[in-house]
Image (cartoon, rainbow, N blue to C red):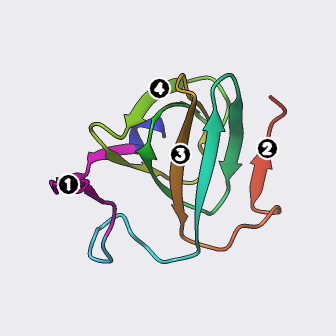
């Protein structure tokens, strides 16, 4: 199941006034539908997560900073680690039924998360950290 997580390099459009990171188009094969889009700040020394979505897929990137993601299979036995940063940005595709958490070693970092359905507490599982 953890092999289904994808890390796809994103295109950087160079610009003298500041580069542009092309996050997603509706033609991207990983884009199913729009549910919600949100930005999450993560501060150094904190951990967010141990979330699992039963139906929702997440498309994430890090437009600012560097974020360390840890993924575990549904039974919390197998682990996979991926780091995403703003220097070499990537699209992270997280299918349902994968536990994940994230942290940063920077002062703070920002995550963008596009989910393919509206957030629902009934659809999400959370573990205490």
**Of callouts 1 and 2, which one flags the residue occurring earlier in the amino acid sequence?**
1
Q: Are marks 1 and 3 in contact (CB under 8 Å)?
A: no
Q: Residues within 10 Å of mark 3 (few under 14, many from 20)?
A: many
Q: Which mark is residue 80?
A: none
Q: Is residue 11 left or right of residue 108?
A: left
Q: Tell me the quadrant of the picture where the C terminus can be found.
A: top right
SS of the residue at dot 1? strand
Displayed quadrant of residue 71:
top right
- State the CA–CA distance, disc 2 to disc 4: 19 Å
Q: Horizontal and vertical percent for residue 106?
A: 52, 26
Q: Residues within 10 Å of mark 1 (few under 14, many from 20)?
A: some
SS of the residue at dot 3? strand
Q: Is residue 122 above or below residue 5?
A: below
Magenta region, residue range? 6-24
Q: Are marks 4 and 3 in contact (CB under 8 Å)?
A: no
Q: Which residue is mark 2?
A: 126
Displayed quadrant of residue 83:
top left
- State the CA–CA distance, disc 1 to disc 3: 18 Å
Q: Which residue is mark 3?
A: 110
């Amino acid at each position: 199941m953890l092999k289904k997580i994808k890390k796809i390099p994103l295109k950087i459009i160079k610009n003298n006034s500041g580069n542009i990171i092309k996050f997603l188009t509706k033609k991207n094969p990983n884009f199913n539908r729009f549910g919600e889009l949100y930005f999450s700040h993560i501060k150094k020394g904190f951990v967010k997560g141990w979330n699992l979505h039963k139906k929702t897929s997440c498309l994430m990137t890090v437009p600012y900073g560097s974020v360390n993601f840890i993924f575990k299979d549904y039974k919390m036995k197998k682990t996979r680690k991926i780091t995403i940063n703003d220097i070499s940005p990537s699209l992270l595709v997280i299918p349902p039924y994968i536990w994940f958490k994230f942290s940063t070693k920077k002062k703070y970092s920002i995550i963008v998360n596009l989910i393919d359905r509206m957030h629902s507490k009934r659809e999400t599982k959370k573990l205490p950290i």
